[in-house]
Amino acid sequence: MQPIESFEVPAPSKVNYINAQYGLKSWLLTKDHKRIALLYLGSITFFFFIGGIYALMIRLELLTPQGDLLQSTTYNKVFTQHGIIMIFFFLIPSIPATLGNFLIPMMIGAKDLAFPRINLLSWYIYMLGGIVTIYALLAGGVDTGWTFYTPFSTTFSNSYVVAAGLGIFINGFSSILTGLNFIVTIHTMRAPGMTWFRMPLFLWSHYATSLIMILGTPVIAITILLLAFERLSGVGIFNPALGGDPVLFQHLFWFYSHPAVYIMILPAMGVISELVANFSRKNIFGYSFVAFSSLAIAVFGFLVWGHHLFVASQSVYAGMIFSFLSFAVAIPSAIKVFNWTATLYKSSISYDTPMLYALGFIGLFTIGGMTGLFLASLAVDVHLSDTYFVVAHFHYIMVGGALMGYLGGLHYWWPKISGRMYPEGWGRFSALVIFVGFNLTFLPQFVAGYLGMPRRYHAYPPEFQVFNVLSTAGASILGFGMLIPAIYFVWSMRYGKHAEANPWHLPGLEWRTQSPPLTENFEVTPIVTWEAYEFAPPEETEVVGKFGPELERI
Amino acid sequence: MSEHIVSVRVYFAIFLALLVGTALTVVAAFVDFPWRFNTIVALTIASIKATLVVLYFMHVRYSPRLVWVIVASALFWMGILFAFTFSDYLTRGWLSIGY
Amino acid sequence: MQGWLPLVPESASTFSWQVDALYFYLSGVTLFFVLLISAVLIFFTIRYRRRTPYEIPRPIAGSHKLETLWTVIPFVIAMTMFGWGARIYFEQYKPPQNAIEVYVVGKQWMWKLQHATGQREINELHVPVGRKIKLIMTSEDVVHDFFVPAFRTKADVVPGRYTTLWFEATKPGKYHLFCAEYCGMNHSGMIGSVYVMEPREFDNWLAGNTGSSTPAAAGQQLYQTLGCASCHGANGEGGRGPTLAGLFGRPTQLEGGQTITADEAYIRESILNPGAKIVAGFTPIMPTFQGQVTEDQLVQILAFIKSLPGGTRAQGAQGTASPGASPAASTPAASPASSPAGSPTGNVR
Amino acid sequence: MIESHATTQDVHGHPALQHHFENMEQQREAGTIGMWVFLVTELMFFGGMFLAYALYRSQFPAAFASASNHLDITLGAVNTAVLIVSSFTMALAVYFTQVGKLRPQIICLILTLVLGVTFLGIKAVEYHEKYTDRLIPGHLIPSAPFGPDAHALHLLPGATLPQVEMFYWIYFAMTGMHALHMIIGAGLLTFLIIYSIKGRFDPEYHGPVEIIGLYWHFVDIVWIFLFPLLYLLGRHFEHG
C-alpha cells in the first residue's frame, strides 16, 4: 500500500500567488487565474448577500396573508430582483468562476487558463453587468419577474426593464468567455499523461457546463436585446398587438434558461464527485458513467425547455415530446446519485465539513430531482405550474444542490486557496444549521403548492398561512446559518491554522503543490502517471462479486 | 504537426464559385418556381456557398477532427433550436381548440 | 374532508381524482427513492466510517451490470409516469363536444366572463354541477392564467389568441379562482371564485341575471355595423366573401391546397389578419380589423358566426343551455346596465 | 494531435510565446479552437433572429414578400460580391502570412479593410433610403416614426402595414447586428495591419491573422444567408 503522505510535495516556499505581488493594481490587472478566482469570490459573495436580503424580505412579507409589510409594487420588485441577482450574478458564475477558475488549470497541470487576458476581461464584464443591474435596482427596480415575460415586460411594466436587461446581456458575455476559456483549456492545456479519462470528474462537469454556456447564452443575449429594443422603439417581435407572438419569447427565453439550470447544478455535481471520492478515499464507482452523464445532461438539457410551456398555449403534441425528453434527462442525474452512493460502499468515510455538505447534497438533490418528475409529468404539471411547488422544487436544486455544492467545495479547497484551515467545529455546526433551516424553509412549500398557492403572490388566502410561517421560520435559520461561514472564512484568513500542501492527504494534482500555490502553479510541468482518485495502486483493485469479464477497470 | 497551407489556386477557384453562386441565386430569384422551390433553391445555393467558405477559406477541410466536431455541433444546436420550436408551431393546428 | 393539515386541495372536477392518483403515485415513488438513498447513505456513512487515519480501502472499479440496472429501472418507471401524465393531459386539453361555452377575457387585474346566454360576471363564475364547461379565453393586455386548484386545471390566457380550458365540476361549492401567471402590480388581487351549483339552482341563477344581450346577438349587431354583411351576406350566406353560415367546426379548403378546421383561432385570425389563410376560390380583398374591434367584440362576432344555422354541427352551447335564456337571445338591444362589449378602457378599476 | 504536447520546454522561445504555453504550436492551436468555439456562440446569437425570421415569414408571407421586394436588390447583390471579394483577399492574407511574404500580406489586409468599409458604406446608403421612405420601424428614430407610403410599397394582396413593419424590424435587427460585426471586424483588421507593418507576424507566429480571418469569413457567411432571405425570397411574386 502506498501511503499518500509519500507523494512528493515540494518544500513550502515563502512565495505564493497571493504575496507574489502587492498593491491594488497587482490585483486589478492580474492575469493569474487564481487571483481572478478570488476577485470573483469577493464579488459573488457581495451579490449573494444582496440576493439574500431580498429573500428575507420576501419571507417576512409572506408571514401574514394580508400583504401588509411591503406594497405590492415593492414586493414584485423584491422577488424579481432576488431572482435576477441570485441566478445571473450568483448561481451561474458561482462554482465555475471561482472554484473552476482556480482549479481547472491546477487539476490538469497547466500554468494558467488558455486565455488569461480574456479571463480577466470576463471578470470586468461581470462587474460591469453587475453595476448596470445595481443601477437598475437603485434607480427604481424591475418588476417583471426574472422571466421577463412579454408583453408585460415590453409594454406594460413601468420599471427599469431595459437597464436590468442590459445588465444581464452584458453579464452573459462574461459567462460565454468563461465557458470558452474552459473548453479550450481542457482541450489544449492538459499536462503530459493527463488523458481525458484520467481527469477528475470536476473537469468533466465543467466541460459540460461550458458547452451549455457557449451554446445557450448567446440565445438569451439576443432575446433580451430584442426585448429591450422592442421596449424602446415600440415595435415588436413579441408584441401581439403587432402580430408578434409572446410565446416565441418564451421559447427563446427557455432555450437558454432551462439549460441554465444545468449551468448551475452541473459544476456542483462535479464538486460532489470530488468530495465523495476524496473523503471516502475511494475511486468513483463507474467513473465513465458519471463522466458521460455530465455530457448527456448538457445535451439533453437543451431538448426539454418546452416543459416550461405546458400551460402556456404550446401545442399539445410539442408538450408531449418535451415531457418525454424531460423524463429522459432525469436518468443521467439518477445515474450520478446511484454511483455516488455506491462509491461509499466499503470505503473509509471521514466526517469533515465538506463531506457533510456532500451527503446533504445527495439527499436534497434526490428530493429536488424527483420532484422535478412531478413537473415533467404533463397532467400534474398543469396543476402545479406557477405554484409554490415549482418554487420549492427549484430551490431544492439551486440551494439544496448548487449552493450546498459550492459551500462544500469552498470548505474543501479553502486550505489550497487561502493557505489556512477553517475551524472544523464551526464548519460542521453551520452545515447542520443550514441543512435544517433549508428543509424547514422549502419542504412546506411543496404542500402549499399542491394545495394551489400560486407563486409571486403578495397576498394570499389565509389557509396557506401555516406553511408560510414554517417557511419564514426556516428562512431565518437558513440566513443565520449562512452568516457563520461568512464570518469564519474571513476570520481564518488571518487567524486560521496554516494549511499544509496536502491537508486532506489526497492524490489529486492540485494537492501536489504548495498551499497557497505558486503563480505558475507547479515548479515543473507535472507528468501524470496515475488515474483519477488513485488512492491505492491499480493491482489492489477489487473485483466485486461475480461480475464477469464485462467489468472493466476504467 | 504542421498546418496545411492551401494554395492560391484553390482559393481563386472557390472565389469564382462564390461569385457564380451569387449571380445564380439572383437570377433564380426572378424565376417563378412551383410550390416552395424558390425558397429551397435560394437556401441550397446559400448553403453550398457557406460550405465552400467553411471548408476552404476557413480551412476546415484540412483541420483536426476537433474543428469538425465544433462545426457539426454548432449546426446540430441550431437544428435543435429550430426543430423544437417549430414542433410547437407546426403542430398547433392538429388538435383544434374549437368544436 | 379538510383535516388538520390537508395534503391535497378539495376535489371538485372529473380531473381531480385522476391528477391526484398520479400525484400519489409520483409521491410514492419519490418517497421510496428518497428513503432508499437516505437509508443507504446513512448506513454506509456509519458502517464505513474512517476508523484509523491511515486506512486505504480497496478500490472498486464499477459494474456495468449495476449501471445498466439503475439506468433501465428508473427509465421504465419514468416512462410509466410519462404515459400516465400524457394521457390525462391530452384529455384536459382536448375540448369536449356539446359543452356549455363561457367567454373569458382577462385584463389587468380582473376576469371578465360572459355566458353564451348573455350573463356577465366579473371575477366570479357560476357553473352547474355535472356539465362540461368550456372556457374560450383571451387577454386584453398581458399573459394571465386561469387556475382553479379544486379542478386541477389551468391554462394561460394569452393576448392575441384564444386558448381553451374545460372541466366538469362534480361537487357544488365555492372554489378559488387564481391568476397563476404573473401579470403585474395587482397580480395577487386577480382572484375570484367559481361557484358550482346544482342544475336547478343554476337555472334560477341564470333566470335572475338576464341583464345583457347574448354574445351572439351583440355579435350580429356588430356584424351589421362593421359592414361584414356587405360581403359575407346578411345571414352569412356568402357573396364576395366566403360563406359563414355553418362554417364553424367544418373543414375548410384553403388557397394552396391546405385544409384546416374552422375553429375559434382560425376565425379570429381571419378577422384580424385576413390575408393569412385564404379560402380557396376567393381573393384576399378583406381589410384587417386589427385595432378596430376589442377582444370582447371579437368574442361576440365569433359567437354570432357560431350561431349561424346550416352547419353540420348545430351550435352546441346555445342549444343545450338553459331554456330560460333563449328569449333573451332574440333581443338584439344592448343592455343599459353594462356598457356592452367593453370599450377598450371601459370598466377599469 | 491534441493529446501530444511537447514535454520539454520549448527549445526556441519565440518572442510571441506566452508564458503559460509550452510551445508555439500549442498557442496557435488554442487560439484557433478558441475562435471556433466563439463562432459557435456567434452562430447561436444570430440563430435566435433567424428563428424569428422563419416563424414570421411563414405567418405573413405576403407582407414579407412585399417588404422584401422594396429592398434594393442591386445594392444587396453588389454588397454580397464585395464581401465575397473581401473574404478572398482575407484568405490570401492568411496565405501570404503563412508563407512569409510580408508585402502582399499587408496589401491583402488593407484591401480587405477597404472592401469591408465599402460594404458598410453601401449599407449606410440603403439605411438612408429606408429612412427617407419612413420605413424604420416604430419610433426608433423619434422624428421619423414608421409610416411609409402604402402605395409605393406595392403591397401584395393580404399584406398589411404592421406586418411590413415586422419585416423591417427583423431586417434592421439582423443587418444591424451584421453591420456591428463588420465594424468590429474592421477594427480587428486595423490592428492586424498595424502589427503586420511592424513585422510581428511570421510563418511561425501567424495565429492572430488566422483567427481574425476565421471571424471575417464567418461574418461573410452570415451575409451569404441574409442576402437571399431578406432580398430575394419574394421576387418571383412580381412576375407570377
Image: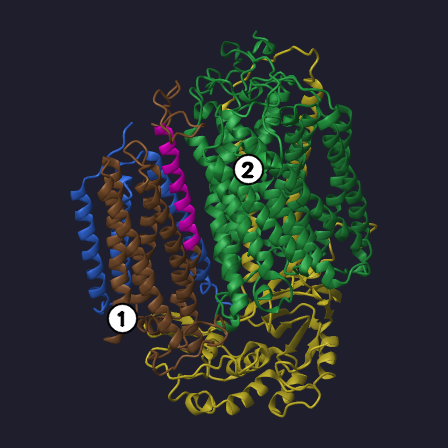
- Find out whether residue A553 is within the magenta segment: no
Q: Which residue is mark 2?
A: A29
The answer to whether residue A454 is visible is no
Q: Which label sits in the foreground, 2 or 1?
A: 2
Q: Secondary structure at mark 1?
A: helix
Q: Colour of chain D?
A: brown
Secondary structure, mark 2, is: loop
- The answer to whether mark 2 and mark 1 are in CB contact below 8 A is no
Q: Amino acid at mark 1?
A: Arg
Give the image location of residue C4, x and y in percent: 83, 50
Chain of the residue displaying label 1: D
Label 2 amino acid?
Answer: Leu
Q: Identify which residue is drawn at 33% across, 70% down.
A: D68
Closer to us: A229 or A151: A229
* Outermost residue to the front: D198
The subunit letter for the residue under badge 2 reads A
Residue B14, position as x, y percentages in the image? 20, 48
Q: Choose between A462 and A546: the one closer to the eye.
A: A462
In the visual, does A121 lie left or right of C25? Answer: left
Taking the magenta stretch, the answer to whether it contains residue D38 is: yes
D192 with respect to A155 (left or right): left
Q: Which residue is mark 1?
A: D235
Q: Colour of chain B?
A: blue
Closer to us: A466 or A515: A515
Left or right: residue C122 compared with residue C142: right
Mark 2 Cα shell of 10 Å, populated few (<14), some (14-19), many (≥20): few
Instruction: Identify the residue at horizontal 58%, vertical 50% (top origin).
Output: A129
- Does residue B18 appear in the picture of this structure? yes
Boundaries of the magenta span: D24-47
Query: The chain coloured yellow carries which letter?
Result: C
* Distance from Cα at disc 2 to Cα at disc 1: 55 Å
Outermost residue toward the top in this view: A1
